[in-house]
Amino acid sequence: MNFSRSKANGDFFVALVVASAMLIPAVGCRSRGLLPPAGPIDRQQATAVVHDPYPLDDIAPTDQGARPPSFQRPLPEPVRNRIFPDAMPWLGR
């Protein structure tokens, strides 16, 4: 039997476990993650108004049960058309 190959695999596994055991405390559990925090509630509400995920009544058939109570009154079309140009005036729109 050839034990040299299994010994090499075992050494690699031990080295991997030791490296993981040293890396996990170095990284820590309190990392920020990939996404930043959501921010204060006012900012979250403003983002939810701008990025309304529900179908709009003026461009699609009305579905009364699709929108939750807090989204019953979407922004009017003229306001929706001005959100991004007003937020980014340097684009010259």
Image: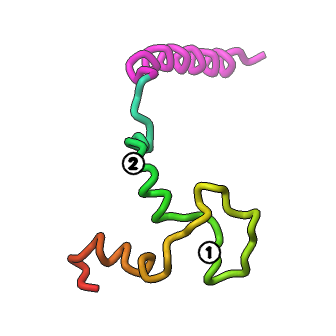
For disc 1, the neighbor class at 10 Å (few under 14, some 14 to 19, many from 20) is: some
Please state which of residues 62 and 84 is positioned toward the viewer in this rendering: 62
State the separation of the CA atoms marked 2 and 1.
23 Å
Which residue in the rendered view is the most extreme toward the right? 1
Q: Is residue 74 magenta?
A: no
Q: Earlier in the sequence, mark 2 or mark 1?
A: 2
**What kind of secondary structure does the magenta stretch mostly adopt?**
helix
Q: Circle 2 — which element?
A: helix
Please state which of residues 5 and 20 is positioned toward the viewer in this rendering: 20
Q: Is residue 74 depicted above or below 71 in this figure? A: below
Query: What residue do we see at 42% from left, 43% from top?
Result: 41
Name the residue carrying label 2.
Answer: 42
Viewport quadrant of the C terminus: bottom left
**Residue 18, percent from left and from top:** 50, 14
Query: What residue do we see at 25% from left, 80% from top?
Result: 91
What's drawn in magenta, residue-wise?
A: 1-29
Q: Is residue 86 left or right of residue 48?
A: left
Find residue 83 and name its label.
none
Find residue 56 and name its label.
1
**Residue 58, percent from left and from top:** 61, 82
**Residue 47, percent from left and from top:** 44, 57
Query: What residue do we see at 30% from left, 70% from top?
Result: 87
Please state which of residues 42 and 1 is positioned toward the viewer in this rendering: 42
Residue 68 quadrant: bottom right
Residue type, numbered disc 1: Leu
Residue type, numbered disc 2: Asp
